[in-house]
């Protein structure tokens, strides 16, 4: 049989009969069955094309890229194997191809899927009593990988009928795949050692390099691993030495080869997974968009790696300055206002963090005073308060189920009667409690849920302390809620990946309410009552910002927005341990300010409200947009009733003759297209101040535009 060079379909059965004088009839039947199965059996399984196999191939890691296409993170999603990118035939070094062919299938480019010499030799060996083994070409091995019916049971060899079917399927595969495609798919789908699946993973796992950079010795080792990947190292070393000896014509030092094999295989203890700059950000993407794990192995994110590294440096530097005040960690997130794109996602201080594996951006904590803007916004929306309304900052006791709740301001002082503007800008606690009392707490909890905040308790669980941030909320949720004010009252979810089709937007507040909140949170003068004039919240460009500190100084927050960005900062301890005399203005605010300055270095100064343009769009018709003066739009949004101050009480003097007593109505700007309304009754155009004769009663003074929309209001009483 050694003289047979090729397998031919017209093999003569007589030749077989002449050599059967030492076989029984049962073995003759086996041979006839083999020929029958080889030439006439068919299968219902249809091989996929090479393109389909390649497209269905999934590396064990997902790769994440920043908005400029830079690889920033790899995250493993397959735990059963380790694989990398598919490698095409033209990327293989010639000596790698030659080594694998020499070890596995010397006549690969000559046969049609089956090596006749090896097949017949294997059959004769089987008929003599040995097990069926060997003779598998690369095409036959690939057919087994692709066709589940050909795969043997665990810990068992293929049956003789599986072997014959494998032969048939290999010939079928070769009929519509090229040789190069078969070889390429084969080396990308087989295991080389341990969990290393595919040539790319093997090259990186064993040698820390790409396939194109493999040396001849490394190629010999990879080729030797294919037949039995889990063999002992000494066995593999002998196999490599024999292969190298055959390829180099006997000029090889087996000691050097063995040393090289041992070093390479022992090195494969820690697979290099790089880069790993934003592991928590990558996990967050898959948490919010789990479908991405199955749909793609390359994800183009909205993150800016440039700003990511800069903000990390800002956070780490500031945390170090607070170490003596028991501040151990922090987190920063930056969102683009219009799109909701995540620009920066610093989940902790990195390697120096005691919880570097923990995402502090998604960790829920009490948010302190950062909920106050939403309390006032809902009051504005329901027209129960205005920025000029008067609230009392004085001692208060509220009955709750535990007893009497007596809130205090941060500095434990009282300011007396203050406007809503001053109360919110200076973050006074007691006026915020009073403002919440004007609302149904159920409504406020529903509002927070509409803002994307999840996991809230039932309203009675919080009581009046909800106004002071008693709820547990994540930095991600809180920052995106503030983005609603920057977008004129419209909510949309955070966007993680580029060209995302998710565009869910819903109105929460009116543009007027959003503007009023933004205006208050940017008012340096009103803020000075609580924070003074010189602090980290004042910027040279327009920003609206709010700080917060949870009970016992356990959590420190600073959330604010400009025309383009919303930045959220948390500073504190992952364990929940209290900080030492660190408030929002001294803890999180410096990080917020530096981050904002970094983002606006190339944008220039913006001195108008970020929600201003949105309000303009909401309140003007297409005709007005084309004809109105931009200065008129600015004046429209700066309308504010100056007198009477909301909450004022007047008394009629009986000693002054009737008609001689007047109350002066004034506003911040005058325009004939706006009007004074008192208890919904038209008084006059707002072309100047207005004198009104007082009568006993309660009144609501409104300034309305020509479409009778309220732009400012004030409540007062005459006694």
Image (spheres, grey):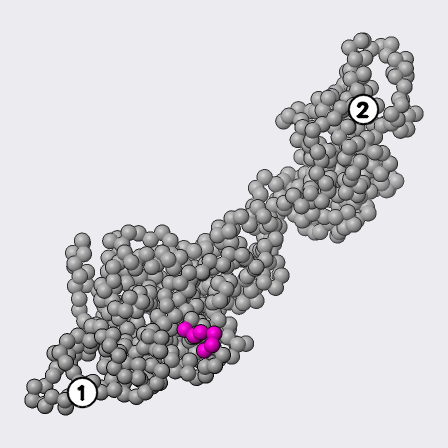
The residue that appears at 48% across and 55% down in the rendered structure is: 356
Name the residue beneath numbered marker 2: 39
* Residue 78 - label: none
Would you say 253 lies left or right of 404 here?
right
Would you say 292 lies left or right of 253 here?
left
Give the magenta-colored segment's residue range: 619-624
Check disc 1: other Cα within 10 Å, few if <14, some if 14-19, many if 20+: some
Give whichever of discs 2 and 1 has the lower sequence position: 2
Name the residue beneath numbered marker 1: 662
Q: Is residue 622 inside the magenta stretch? A: yes
Q: Could you tell me residue 627's position as x and y percent?
A: 47, 81
The answer for how far apart the CA atoms under marks 2 and 1 are is: 112 Å
Q: Could you tell me residue 644's position as x and y percent?
A: 23, 81
- Displayed quadrant of residue 26: top right
Q: Could you tell me residue 429's position as x and y percent?
A: 26, 68
Q: Main secondary structure of the magenta part?
A: helix
The residue that appears at 72% across and 40% down in the rendered structure is: 49
Element carrying mark 1 = loop
Residue 275 vs 240, above or below: the answer is: below
Q: Is residue 343 visible?
A: yes
The residue that appears at 75% across and 45% down in the rendered structure is: 218
Element carrying mark 2 = helix
């Amino acid at each position: 049989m050694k003289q047979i060079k090729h397998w031919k379909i017209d093999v003569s059965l007589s030749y077989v009969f002449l050599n059967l004088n030492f076989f029984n009839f049962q073995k003759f039947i086996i041979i006839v069955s083999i020929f029958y199965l080889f030439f006439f059996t068919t299968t219902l399984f249809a091989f996929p094309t090479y393109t389909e196999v390649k497209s269905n191939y999934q590396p064990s890691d997902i790769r994440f890229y920043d908005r400029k296409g830079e690889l920033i993170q790899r995250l493993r999603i397959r735990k059963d194997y380790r694989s990398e990118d598919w490698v095409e035939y033209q990327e293989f070094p010639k000596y790698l191809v030659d080594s694998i062919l020499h070890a596995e299938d010397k006549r690969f480019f000559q046969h049609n899927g089956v090596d006749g010499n090896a097949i017949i030799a294997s059959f004769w060996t089987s008929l003599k009593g040995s097990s069926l083994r060997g003779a598998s070409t690369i095409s036959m091995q690939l057919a087994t990988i692709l066709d589940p019916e050909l795969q043997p049971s665990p810990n068992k060899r293929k049956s003789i009928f599986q072997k014959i079917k494998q032969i048939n399927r290999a010939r079928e595969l070769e009929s519509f795949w090229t040789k190069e495609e078969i070889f390429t798919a084969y080396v990308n789908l087989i295991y080389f050692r341990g969990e290393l699946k595919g040539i790319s993973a093997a090259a990186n796992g064993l040698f820390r390099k790409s396939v194109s950079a493999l040396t001849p010795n490394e190629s010999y080792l990879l080729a030797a691993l294919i037949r039995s990947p889990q063999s002992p190292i000494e066995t593999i070393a002998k196999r490599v030495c024999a292969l190298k000896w055959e390829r180099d014509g006997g000029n090889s030092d087996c000691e050097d080869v063995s040393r090289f094999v041992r070093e390479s295989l022992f090195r494969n203890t820690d697979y290099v997974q790089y880069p790993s700059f934003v592991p928590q950000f990558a996990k967050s993407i898959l948490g919010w968009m789990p479908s991405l794990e199955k749909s793609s192995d390359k994800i183009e994110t909205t993150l800016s790696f440039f700003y990511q590294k800069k903000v990390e440096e800002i956070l780490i530097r500031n945390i170090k300055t607070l170490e003596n005040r028991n501040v151990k960690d922090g987190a920063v997130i930056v969102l683009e206002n219009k799109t909701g794109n995540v620009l920066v996602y610093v989940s902790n201080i990195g390697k120096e963090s005691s919880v570097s594996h923990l995402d502090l951006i998604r960790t829920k904590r009490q948010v302190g005073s950062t909920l106050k803007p939403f309390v006032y916004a809902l009051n504005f929306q329901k027209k129960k308060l205005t920025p000029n309304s008067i609230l009392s900052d004085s001692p208060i006791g509220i009955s709750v189920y535990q007893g009497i709740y007596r809130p205090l301001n941060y500095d434990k002082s009282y300011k007396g009667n203050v406007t809503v503007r001053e109360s919110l800008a200076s973050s006074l606690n007691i006026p915020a409690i009073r403002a919440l009392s004007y609302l149904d707490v159920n409504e406020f909890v529903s509002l927070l849920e509409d803002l994307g905040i999840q996991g809230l308790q039932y309203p009675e669980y919080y009581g009046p302390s909800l106004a002071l941030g008693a709820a547990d909320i994540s930095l991600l949720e809180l920052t995106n809620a503030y983005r609603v004010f920057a977008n004129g009252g419209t909510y949309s979810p955070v966007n993680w990946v580029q060209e995302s089709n998710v565009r869910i937007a819903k109105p929460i507040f009116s543009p007027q309410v959003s503007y009023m909140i933004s205006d208050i949170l940017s008012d340096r003068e009103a803020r000075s009552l609580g924070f003074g004039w010189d602090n980290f919240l004042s910027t040279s460009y327009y920003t609206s910002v709010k700080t917060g500190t949870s009970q016992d100084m356990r959590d420190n927050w600073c959330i604010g927005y400009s025309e383009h960005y919303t930045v959220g900062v948390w500073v504190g301890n992952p364990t929940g341990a209290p900080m030492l005399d660190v408030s929002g203005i001294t803890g999180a605010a410096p990080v917020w300010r530096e981050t904002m300055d970094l983002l606006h270095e190339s944008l220039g100064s913006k001195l108008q409200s970020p929600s201003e343009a949105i309000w303009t769009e909401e309140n003007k018709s297409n005709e007005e947009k084309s004809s109105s003066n931009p200065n008129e739009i600015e004046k429209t949004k700066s309308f504010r009733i100056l007198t009477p101050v909301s909450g004022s009480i007047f008394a009629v003097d009986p000693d002054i003759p009737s008609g001689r007593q007047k109350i002066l109505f004034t506003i911040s700007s005058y325009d004939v297209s706006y009007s004074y309304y008192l208890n919904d009754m038209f008084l006059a155009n707002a072309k100047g101040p207005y004198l009104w004769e007082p009568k006993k009663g309660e009144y609501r003074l409104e300034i309305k535009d020509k479409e009778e929309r309220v732009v400012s209001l004030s409540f007062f009483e005459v006694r």
